[in-house]
Image (cartoon, helix red, strand yellow):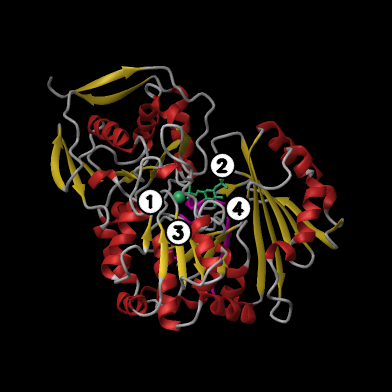
Amino acid sequence: MAATVQQISLSSPFADQKPGTSGLRKSSKQFETPHYLESFIESSLRVLPGVAGGTLVVGGDGRYGNRRAIGVIARMAAAHGVARLITTTGGILSTPAASHLIRQNGAIGGVILSASHNPGGPEGDFGVKINGANGGPTPESITDAIFAVTQTLDGYRILEGTPELALDQPGSQQLSAMTVEVVDGVEAYVALMQKLFDFDAIGDLLRGDFPIAFDAMHAVTGPYATRILEGLLGAPAGTVRNGTPLEDFGGGHPDPNLTYAHELAELLLGSDAYRFGAACDGDGDRNMILGQRCFVNPSDSLAVLTANATLAPGYADGLAGVARSMPTSAAADVVAKDLGLPCYETPTGWKFFGNLLDAGRITLCGEESFGTGSNHIREKDGLWAVLFWLNILARRREPVAQIMAEHWNRFGRHYYSRHDYEAIASEAAHGLYKRVQEMQPALVGQAFAGRTIATADDFAYTDPVDGSLTSGQGLRLLLDDGSRVVLRLSGTGTQGATLRVYLESYVPPSGNLSQDPQAALGDLITAIDGLAEIKTRTGMDRPTVIT
Ligand code: VG1
Ligand code: CO
């Protein structure tokens, strides 16, 4: 049959389903229902500027559903007049590498197939993230417009009668009038990293007595890490663990934290076999950094990268500024102040960094949720953070634990922890949240954990570049000694609701810098449980994940 554009009629499957902070993330089963993926892609193609005649990048983290989705998106892109579609061998493309491909090729944007750190497979989750021409997550104006189209959608356009795309090797093929270019998804990204970091110095370090372990968690960073660490930098074979992307991530939860990457954590924290360890998440944008018997919390990691940035060639000229998401600790703020750099506090989610990066106001940014990045792309970047740390270690030649100790001795320490209560009943979560929200005005001036509540608010952000206002971003209790507790409901979970409790307390260089964070934050933990009735209302004795 000749390739023809079909107009499929339907009634929108999206009644009331507002996309979350990172696009559309649902169960694989949901994505397999007829017209579901197609409806979201149709809505996105109608809203994204420049589709007709433009270039689009498509790829994903290799989870179950990846190849099928690439085929559907390609046929829909052709039906919407896209001139050139860039995808990768096997359809494997990390989120940061996708951001780079979009920017490098002057694309109108990209479609990234991933549910990030959520489990994959037929019983797991799938997701679609729409990125714009700057390579970053589309701003709220676009996600809101896509959502609006989904509400009234009555059909979609797709090319039918075409052979399956050949994704196994690089090459070019035609899909009706559209050119499909299959490129090596790793190459361009590797070249970018070589521009930013001193590969000679890192190679010297790794070829010496400096064993490291990298856990790709059977997700997308395997091929990138193997080529960079074992290939270019000379680390021994086996340095990259779980390096083959699997459709179900080997049954694991590709979230690089102490709970889900516990094997790696035990190797680093419970033995002296390795000097450095790191892991990345499903789509490669998150990172966890470990040293020998040392866990680096992501807020501290951003602060250390800021303080040591000029050791890496790509940042040798200094930084324009830094930004962190609101729940991230203020460790980077202290460094920024010391360096005389502007420092911004944004709502959770990478899209808010995009404007600041585009405007040249910041160079580095990060989130407490294991996300760190810079102006080299418009997404957070897991392997970039790993290479940045290795570059610093190669130059300083000190153990990670010593770098942390010296950092705290100079800037003071922000004890920090996040407690997640996952998959709780939606009603219980919203009830708890609303109650605290309503209590907030009366909380100011009240005693809390031996301090006084100075401010109690729901975080709102006015974008300094475009003036847009984003409110309802998390309930803050700011205490008179600079400590704080924040409550937020997750926007990325797919089962019930997830309550996140963020705890932070600052100790100056003269104070006790070597406590266990859970102990240092113990009084805040008890006090917020009492105030918000977390245990009784969630019916959970303890958080599912403690970071
Ligand atoms: C979580 C994190 C947030 C991050 C988001 C996307 O969101 O807390 O910091 O930006 O995931 O990360 P939430 O709403 O569940 O707290 V990823 O790795 O999916 O791109
Ligand atoms: Co991710």
For the record, the magenta segment spans 341-361
Determine which residue is flagged by label 2. 491
373 sits left or right of 3 in the view: right
Q: Three-letter amino acid code at disc 3?
A: Ala
Of the numbered discs 2 and 3, the one sitting upstream in the chain is: 3
Q: Three-letter amino acid code at disc 4?
A: Tyr
Q: Secondary structure at mark 1?
A: helix
Give the mark toward the camera: 1 or 4.
1
**Residue 337 figure quarter:** bottom right
Q: Does label 1 point to a residue whose CB lies under 8 Å from ligand 2?
A: yes
Q: Does label 4 point to a residue whose CB lies under 8 Å from ligand 1?
A: no
Q: Is residue 255 magenta?
A: no
Instruction: Check residue 461 in the rendering and tell me which mark sits there, or answer none.
Output: 4
Q: Does label 2 point to a residue whose CB lies under 8 Å from ligand 1?
A: yes
Residue 332 position, x and y percent, is 58, 69
From the viewer's side, name the closer residue of 77 and 35.
35
Q: Three-letter amino acid code at disc 1?
A: Thr
Are the residues tagged 2 and 4 within 8 Å (C-beta)? no
Q: CA distance from mark 2 to mark 4?
A: 17 Å
Q: CA distance from mark 1 to mark 3?
A: 15 Å
Of the numbered discs 1 and 4, the one sitting upstream in the chain is: 1
Determine which residue is flagged by label 3. 279
Of the numbered discs 3 and 4, the one sitting upstream in the chain is: 3
Mark 1: few, some, or many residues within 10 Å (few <14, many ≥20)? many
Mark 3: few, some, or many residues within 10 Å (few <14, many ≥20)? many
Of the numbered discs 1 and 3, the one sitting upstream in the chain is: 1
Task: Work out whether residue 9 can be spotted.
Answer: yes
Q: Where is the N terminus found, in terms of image quarters?
A: top left
Q: Residue at x 20, y 41 (%)?
A: 167
Q: Residue at x 60, y 78 (%)?
A: 405
Q: Where is the C terminus found, in terms of image quarters?
A: bottom right
